[in-house]
Image (cartoon, rainbow, N blue to C red):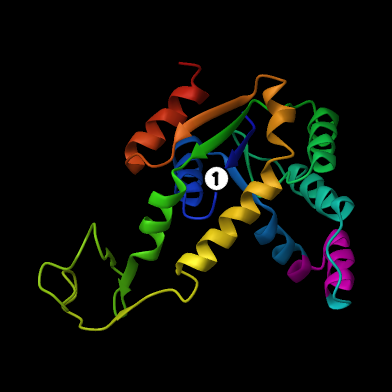
Amino acid sequence: MNIILLGPPGAGKGTQAARLVADRGMVQLSTGDMLRAAVKAGTPVGLQARAVMESGGLVSDEIVSALIGERLDQGTGNGAIFDGYPRTAAQAESLDELLAARGAKLDYVIELAVDEDALVERIVGRFTCATCGEGYHDKFKQPKVAGTCDVCGGHEFKRRADDNEETVRTRMAEYRAKTAPIIPIYEARGLVRRVDGMADIGEVTAAIEAILDGR
């Protein structure tokens, strides 16, 4: 089972991918992580990518596709979850070729659909305990005692610098711009399925499982 998981930052893509890895033995292929790993390991593709990055250039579609091919050749357990790839029509075509060359195919493109305003509220309100990392939210999950962590009793809290409305909306606009070209390609092939990304985490997981099980 090979799937593409789509969704803007904060939609819960990482959480759902981790659950598929744990529950189904799938492998998450995140191009950013893979690129860093290949550069660090000094693989042929990693050396190519390092040279481009050190010169200040953008890693080409060819290098990214070669990276994916290199990883597919190492085996993907019970299937692959493509995260952050493909982002262009050319990459979508390359992915088809990479899978076909290995006797595989793409089964589904699952998009976590979100309400942008509600997602901004979800992200912007997040904060964590600086001591133990317990997560809280301005609206949905305040500490039981104001200023005191429920878990460890700590009194210091922190927020991510990029969890502000302007940054979040910019990231969402980038997501729309990058995914807009590839969704019609897969819709024409009947591969796209949409899940309510604003639902509870467990409900999102159940909806994705139902799709993968053909229910």
Q: Is residue 79 magenta?
A: no
- Residue that mark 1 sits on: 7
Q: Which quarter of the image is occupied by the N terminus?
A: top right
Q: Mark 1, residues whose alpha carbon is within 10 Å: few (<14), some, or many (≥20)?
A: many
Left or right, 35 with reference to 138 = right
Q: Position of residue 182 (x, y in %)?
A: 73, 37
Q: Could you tell me residue 202's position as x and y percent?
A: 33, 38
In depth, the one of 25 and 187 nearer the eye is: 187
Magenta-colored stretch includes residue 51: yes
By secondary structure, the bulk of the magenta-drawn segment is best described as: helix
Q: In this view of the protein, which residue sits in the foreground, 51 or 87?
A: 87
- Which residue occupies 57% across, 54% down? 172
As helix, strand or loop, the secondary structure at mark 1 comes to: loop
Quarter occupied by residue 51: bottom right
Q: Residue at x 76, y 63 (%)?
A: 38
Name which residue lies at 46% across and 44% down: 16
Q: Is residue 215 left or right of residue 61?
A: left
Q: Quadrant of the C terminus?
A: top left
Rendered location of residue 132, percent (x, y): 29, 74
User: Which range of residues does the magenta coloring cover?
Assistant: 39-53
Q: Is residue 15 above or below residue 52?
A: above
Q: Which amino acid, mark 1?
A: Gly
In the rendered view, tell whether residue 7 sits above or below residue 97. below
Give 8 or 40, whichever is nearer the viewer. 8
Of 191 and 185, which appears nearest the observer? 185
The furthest residue to the top: 215
Which residue lies at the image location 87% right of the left edge and 67% below the top edge?
47
Spot occupied by residue 65 in the image (x, y as percentages of width and height): 83, 48
Q: Is residue 47 left or right of residue 10?
A: right
* Outermost bottom residue: 156
Tag count in the figure? 1
